[in-house]
Amino acid sequence: MYAIVRERHGLSLLPDVRCAHEVCVGAEAMGRALAPASFDFVCCANALDHTEDPVAVTRAVAQVLRPGGLLAIEVFTREGSREGWWQLHQFDMYVDDRNELVCETRAGVVRPIVASGCGLVVREIVSSSTTMTIAIAERLAA
C-alpha cells in the first residue's frame, strides 16, 4: 500500500520517501513478522481504530519494541460513533473517567487499548479533546 500511495502522489522516484523494509501483514500480525525488541519507536497516527483488533495491535507493538521503547498513539476521539460506524470506523477511542485510553465497539464493549500484562504502560495522555486523543506508552523491561 505504501508503494501505491507514493505513486499516487508522485513520490515514487524520490529515494528519501521509500521504506527501508516493507512488511505486508495486518497490524495484528506484526509481532510474528518482525524481530522481537527491534524498534525504539512506533508511531500509530489515525490508524489504530481502522484495525480489526486495536488491543491485539498494541500487544504486537509491545513485542517489537525494545525495553524503554515508545509507542505514540494518535486517534480521532470517538470517530466510530461520529462517523456512524461507517466503513473502517468501527471503534470509538477516548480517555474514560479513570483517565485510561480505551476503545469501544458499536455493541458497547469497552477495553483498555493498552491491556494489562501486555508489556506496555501508558506514560502520558498528551492530549484528550473532543476531536483528538494522543497518548505515549512505554515498553517495560522484560
Image (spheres, rainbow, N blue to C red):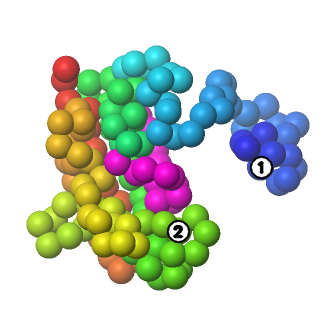
Residue 90 percent location from the top left of the image: 48, 66
Q: Is residue 45 magenta?
A: yes
The secondary structure type at the circle numbered 2 is: loop
The secondary structure type at the circle numbered 1 is: helix
Decide: is 133 above or below 45: below
Decide: is 34 above or below 96: above
Task: First in sequence, mark 2 or 1: give its number.
Answer: 1
Residue holding disc 1: 5
Q: Which mark is residue 89?
A: 2
Q: Distance of mark 2 from mark 1, alpha carbons?
A: 20 Å
Q: Specify the segment rendered in magenta.
A: 39-55
Identify residue type, mark 1: Val
Residue 124 percent location from the top left of the image: 22, 53
- Which residue is located at x 47 percent, y 23 percent? 32
Q: Is residue 61 magenta?
A: no
Identify residue type, mark 2: His
- Which residue is located at x 35 percent, y 48 percent? 55
Q: Which mark is residue 69?
A: none
**In contact (CB < 8 Å): disc 2 and disc 1:** no
**In the shown orientation, is residue 52 left or right of residue 138?**
right
Q: Can you say which quadrant of the picture contains the C terminus?
A: top left
Of residue 14 and residue 139, the one placed in the foreground of this image is: 139
- Which residue is located at x 53 percent, y 68 percent? 89
